Image (cartoon, helix red, strand yellow):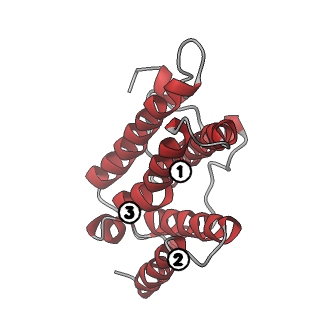
Amino acid sequence: MSLQSAQYLRQAEVLKADMTDSKLGPAEVWTSRQALQDLYQKMLVTDLEYALDKKVEQDLWNHAFKNQITTLQGQAKNRANPNRSEVQANLSLFLEAASGFYTQLLQELCTVFNVDLPCRVKSSQLGIISNKQTHTSAIVKPQSSSCSYICQHCLVHLGDIVPYNSPLLVGRPQVPSIVRSGSW
C-alpha cells in the first residue's frame, strides 16, 4: 500500500459525502462526482492491488455512476414530472459520459498494464493516450489476474450501461464498439 493511495481514499470519502449533501447545488455535486472519478481512476492505475482490496472499482460504479443513473431514471419515468424530457436528455448524456469513462479507463488500464484484449484497439490508434507511459515508477505492478479482473469489470459496466439507455432510444440500443465486437 502506498501512502498516496490511503490519502486518495480519505479524499474519496469527503467527495462521496459532498455528493449526498442536500445543501450543494447540481454543479457542486457534478464537480465532486468528476473529482471522485478522477481520484478512483488514479488509484486503479497506480496501485491496482490496493484499490481492489478496498473495492474501489465497486465504489466507483456505485457512487459515480449507478446512484445518479437510478435517480435520473426515476425522474425520467415519472409522467407527472414537468421536466421529464429534460431529465431524459440529461440521463442520455450521463450514460454517454459513463460509457466514455469506462471505455477510456479500459484503454488506460490495458496500456499501463500491457493487457492485450482481442476487442481493443490500441490507444494510440484512437488518439486517446500514448501507448508509452512516462511515469511508470509511480505504478505498483499488479498481478495479471488483477489486471484481467479490472478489465472485465470495465467491460461488464459498459454492458450495464446499455439497458439503462434502451428505453430512451428508438430502434436498437447503441452498444459501445468495444462491447459490440463480442470477441472478448
Q: Which residue is mark 3?
A: 59
Tell me: 11 left or right of 141.
right
Indicate which label's residue lies in the foreground, 1 or 3: 3
Q: Secondary structure at mark 2?
A: loop
Q: Which residue is mark 1?
A: 105
**Cα–Cα span, label 2 and label 1:** 27 Å
Residue 115: mark in rendering: none
The quarter in which the C terminus is drawn is: top left
Residue 21: mark in rendering: 2
**Cα–Cα span, label 3 and label 2:** 17 Å
**Residue 24 % position (x, y):** 62, 75
Which amino acid, by three-letter code, is at mark 2? Asp
Which amino acid, by three-letter code, is at mark 3? Asp
Indicate which label's residue lies in the foreground, 3 or 2: 2
Q: Residue at x 42, y 33 (%)?
A: 159
Q: Earlier in the sequence, mark 2 or mark 1?
A: 2
- 58 is higher (above) or lower (below) than 88: below
